[in-house]
C-alpha cells in the first residue's frame, strides 16, 4: 500500500554566495512492507530529500503526500511523533537516559503510562537482540552496534509505518552492519513499515527491495 509520495519535489536554499538547488523535480512513491535504498555520491541531495520526507523542511516546489494528505498541511511534529521515525548514522540517543528510557521516550510523549512504556520498550529491545543488562546501560557504555539497535527500537516505538534511516550502518563494522540491515528488513517485511535507507554502501543497497539513485538532485530508479 502506498503510504508516502513525492510529486515534482524541488528544494533550494541560499548561501552567502549562491543559491543551491539540492533536490530537482523528484517524483517517486513508497509502499509499506518494502525496504528501499537511495544511493548516490555525497552532495547528491539524498539527505536533503530524506529531511523533506521527514517533514524537517518543506519543498520549495512540489508536494509530499502522506497517505494521500499534503504533508505541508499537517502538523509536522505530530507526523514525526506518530507516523515517521528517523534513524541517524550518529545514533542521536539521549546520553542521560538508559537504553530502556530512550525507547520509552516516544511512547511517553504520546501519553502512554510509564509502566506500559517500560514493558513495550523491553519487548522492542529484545526484538532487536539486546540482552537485559544492556537495557539498563547509558549510551556511552554501549558499542556502536548496540546504540544503533537502541535507535531502531526507539524508532519502532512510535507505532508509525514510515522508518527513514540516514546512513544507519555508516559507523559500524561489517558484522554489525549486516545485523542492522536484517533488522530493517524485518521492520519492512514482518512489521509492515515503509523503510527508506540513505546509503553509500552497495552491500546494503543490494539487500533492498528497490533502489533509487540520486545524482545532482535528480532521482532515477536503479532497481525495483
Image: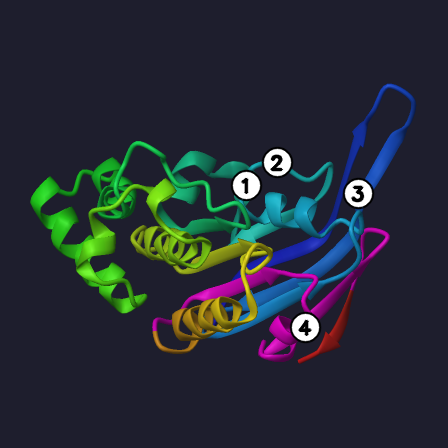
Q: Distance between the residues labelled 2 and 3?
A: 12 Å
Q: Is residue 67 visible?
A: no
- How crowded pointer 1 is (Cα within 10 Å; few <14, some 14-19, many 20+) is rated as many
Residue 22 is labelled as 3
Say which element carries label 3: strand
Other-residue count near label 3 (Cα within 10 Å), few / some / many at <14 / 14–19 / ≥20: many
Q: Earlier in the sequence, mark 1 or mark 4?
A: 1
Residue under the point 84% across and 40% down: 21
Work out whether 51 lies above or below 77: below
Q: Locate residue 94: give its quadrant.
A: top left
Residue carrying label 2: 57
Q: What element carries label 2?
A: loop
First reached walking from the N terminus: tag 2 or tag 3: 3
Nearest the eye: 210 or 89: 89
Q: Which residue is drawn at 63% across and 37% down?
A: 58
Residue 203 higher or lower than 53, as above or below = below
The residue labelled by disc 4 is 211
| Separation of residues labelled 1 and 4 (CA atoms) | 22 Å
Closer mark to the observer between disc 1 and disc 4: 4
Looking at the rendered structure, which numbered label has been put on residue 55?
A: 1
Magenta residues span: 191-219
Dot 1 and dot 2 residues touching (CB under 8 Å): yes
Estimate how packed mark 2 is, as few (under 14), some (14 to 19) or many (20 or more) residues with alpha carbons within 10 Å.
some
Amino acid at each position: 500500500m502506498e503510504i508516502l509520495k513525492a510529486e515534482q519535489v524541488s528544494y533550494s536554499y541560499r548561501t552567502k554566495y549562491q543559491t543551491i538547488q539540492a533536490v530537482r523535480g523528484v517524483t517517486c512513491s513508497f509502499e509499506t512492507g518494502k525496504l528501499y535504498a537511495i544511493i548516490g555520491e555525497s552532495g547528491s541531495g539524498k539527505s536533503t530529500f530524506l529531511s523533506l520526507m521527514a517533514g524537517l523542511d518543506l519543498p520549495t516546489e512540489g508536494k509530499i503526500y502522506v497517505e494521500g494528505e499534503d504533508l505541508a498541511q499537517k502538523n509536522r511534529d505530530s507526523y514525526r511523533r506518530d507516523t515517521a521515525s528517523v534513524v541517524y548514522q550518529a545514533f542521536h540517543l539521549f546520553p542521560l537516559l538508559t537504553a530502556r528510557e530512550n525507547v520509552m521516550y516516544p511512547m511517553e510523549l504520546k501519553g502512554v503510562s510509564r509502566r506500559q512504556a517500560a514493558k513495550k520498550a523491553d519487548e522492542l529491545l529484545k526484538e532487536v537482540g539486546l540482552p537485559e543488562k544492556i537495557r539498563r546501560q547509558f549510551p556511552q557504555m554501549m558499542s556502536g552496534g548496540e546504540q544503533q539497535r537502541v535507535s531502531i527500537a526507539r524508532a519502532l516505538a512510535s507505532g508509525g509505518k514510515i522508518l527513514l534511516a540516514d546512513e544507519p550502518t555508516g559507523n559500524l563494522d561489517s558484522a554489525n552492519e549486516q545485523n542492522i540491515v536484517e533488522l530493517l528488513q524485518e521492520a519492512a517485511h514482518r512489521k509492515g513499515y515503509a523503510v527508506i535507507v540513505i546509503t553509500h554502501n552497495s552491500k546494503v543497497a543490494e539487500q533492498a527491495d528497490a533502489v533509487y539513485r540520486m545524482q545532482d538532485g535528480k532521482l532515477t530508479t536503479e532497481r525495483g
